[in-house]
Amino acid sequence: MDVTWLGSSCVRLQAGGVSVLTDPFDLEVPGSALSADIVTLSLREARGRLLAGGAFRLVDGPGEYEIKGVPVTGVATRRRATNGPDGEARNFVYSIQVDGVMVCHLGRLNRQPSAQEVQELGAPDVLFVPLGEPLGLPVPQAVALASQLEAKLLVPMLLGGPDDQATLERFCRELGSDPSNTEARLSVTASGLPATARVAVLSAAAQAPPGG
């Protein structure tokens, strides 16, 4: 499975001729719209801002799906509303099994999930972590959740906040990783997963506008 981070909470997963795209919105993408077979959306209110084009299957809520042989499970989690009056909104977390590797994409999760929600997320091999308030998790909560889920590869997703670099450095420092060691693409196989958790810092292939 090849993994590319396009910026913000948008990630492309590719394996066996099937492409999965998560959260293709609020990006500065040159050229035409992004193409994929499967598109997952963590925020339903972003439907009108999708940058995906062509024929794709959209998954934008909880439930179990199988599309082109790829199992996708959506779990609803609580999320602090970042616009309008104080309150709660919903975020959808997706577990996606690609090429024998279980991927968990936390979407725009910005608060510590409940014990029940953590249990529903299962045991991922790869965890995509949204970092930085108010759109993503503060570092202590991100580190705690990564420890709870025991994923082997932790991929931070910076959401375009003013303190992104400092947040990334703190997250990596807490987990004993070097934030300057970046990769353009990640190649993941079930047999090649590390024995202990490591942070994989990807460089964005597109650009998230300031403020996410």
Image: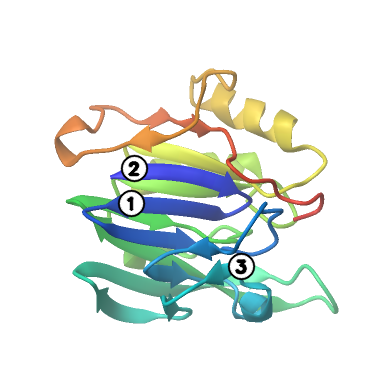
> Residue at 24% across / 66% down in the picture?
70
At label 2, the amino acid type is Asp
Q: Nearer the viewer, residue 29 or 60?
A: 29
Residue 208 is left or right of residue 122, and the answer is: right
Q: Quadrant of the C terminus?
A: bottom right
Mark 2, secondary structure of its residue: strand
Q: Which residue is mark 2?
A: 2
Q: Where does residue 19 sit, x and y in percent of width and height?
A: 35, 59
Q: Is residue 182 shown above or below 37?
A: above
> Residue at 69% across / 46% down in the picture?
207
At label 3, the amino acid type is Leu
Q: Which residue is mark 3?
A: 51
Q: Is residue 185 visible?
A: yes
> Residue at 58% across / 22% down in the picture?
179
Q: Are marks 2 and 1 in contact (CB under 8 Å)?
A: yes
Mark 1, secondary structure of its residue: strand
Q: Quadrant of the N terminus?
A: top left
At label 1, the amino acid type is Gln
* Label number found at residue 14: 1
Q: Where does residue 192 sit, x and y in percent of width and height?
A: 20, 31
N-term-proximal mark, 2 vs 1: 2
Q: Are marks 2 and 3 in contact (CB under 8 Å)?
A: no
Q: Where does residue 166 sit, x and y in percent of width and height?
A: 73, 29
Q: Where does residue 40 sit, x and y in percent of width and height?
A: 46, 70
Dot 3: few (<14), some (14–19), or many (≥20) neighbours within 10 Å?
Answer: some
Q: Is residue 105 shown above or below 192?
A: below
Q: Nearer the viewer, residue 46 or 166?
A: 46
Mark 3, secondary structure of its residue: loop
Residue 79 is left or right of residue 11, and the answer is: right
The residues tagged by marks 2 and 1 sit, at their Cα atoms, a distance apart of 5 Å
N-term-proximal mark, 2 vs 3: 2
> Residue at 34% across / 42% down in the picture?
2
